[in-house]
Amino acid sequence: MMPARGPQRLLRVLTATAAAVLAPWLEAAFHDARAGATDASAAAATVPLQQVVVTAPLAGSETALNEVAANVQRITAKDLNQITALDTSDALNQLSGSVNLNDTQGNPFQPDVNFRGFTASPVLGTPQGVSVFVDGVRVNEAFGDAVNWDLIPESAIASLEVIPGSDPVFGLNTLGGAVTVTTKRGFDYPGTRIESYGGSFGRWDTDFESGGHGEHLDYYLNGNLFAESGCGEHNPSR
């Protein structure tokens, strides 16, 4: 084996010396990095609890209506029991101010609900300007923002709130206001109730509801049967 030349030997000596000098420093830096990561993990584990607010903030909140800078109208289940309403839109028409219906389809379950000149309608293509929420979930259809009022059972409603104003917290197309619906639950509405009535044009309606609860769980069931021949020929509703 040939002996290493002078420059090569010098390079090897310098490399070994640098490694010996830097090794303790690198080891200390490595331990500091591990300690910093451990502290960061501990800090991340102690992040304070974050409160998430649903899209419809008024329903079920602790904010008093007289503290809201708007003329919020609230309708309770007791108010709904005092009237005979076909669905949610009919209840709004009877109990809420500034609300009127426009029956363009000739069907009691497909009206245009107008609130201060803005509309929430099941008819696709109608300019929508009112957002509707059920238990905090927006029920305006994704295509056209239409609202199917017949899918919101009036007899299962615990409260209705009509909130005027174009508040962006309620999402797109909330130009005239929003309607928030809170449904019943077994803890608040125990027992069983059956209601039936009839009217002209072959109309009859039957509502059934039953609720109950245990120590930690509750249940609520609701059903509705409705039929009429309609005021026009070949225009029934079921």
Image (spheres, rainbow, N blue to C red):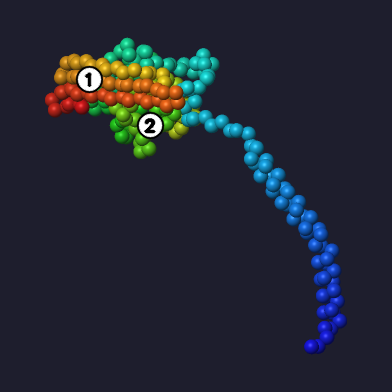
Q: Amino acid at mark 2?
A: Val
- Coordinates of residue 161 in the picture (x, y in percent): 42, 20
Pick whichever of labels 1 and 2 is earlier in the sequence. 2
Q: Which residue is outermost to the bottom?
A: 1
Asked whether residue 179 is in view, the answer is: no
Name the one closer to the observer, 7 or 116: 7
In which quarter of the view is residue 136 placed? top left
Q: Which residue is outermost to the left?
A: 233
Name the one closer to the observer, 221 or 84: 221
- Coordinates of residue 23 in the picture (x, y in percent): 80, 62
- Marks 1 and 2 sit apart, C-alpha to C-alpha, by 25 Å
Tell me: residue 53, above or below residue 190.
below
Q: Nearer the viewer, mark 1 or mark 2?
A: 1
In which quarter of the view is residue 162 placed? top left
Label 1, residues with CA under 10 Å away: few <14, some 14-19, many ≥20: some
Q: Which residue is mark 1?
A: 205
Locate the N terminus and report the quarter of the image it occupies: bottom right
Q: In the figure, is residue 108 to the left or right of 139?
A: left
Q: Secondary structure at mark 1?
A: strand
Tell me: residue 101, above or below residue 50.
above
Q: In the figure, is residue 12 to the left or right of 165?
A: right
Q: Secondary structure at mark 2?
A: loop
Q: Which residue is mark 2?
A: 139
Tell me: residue 57, above or below residue 64.
below
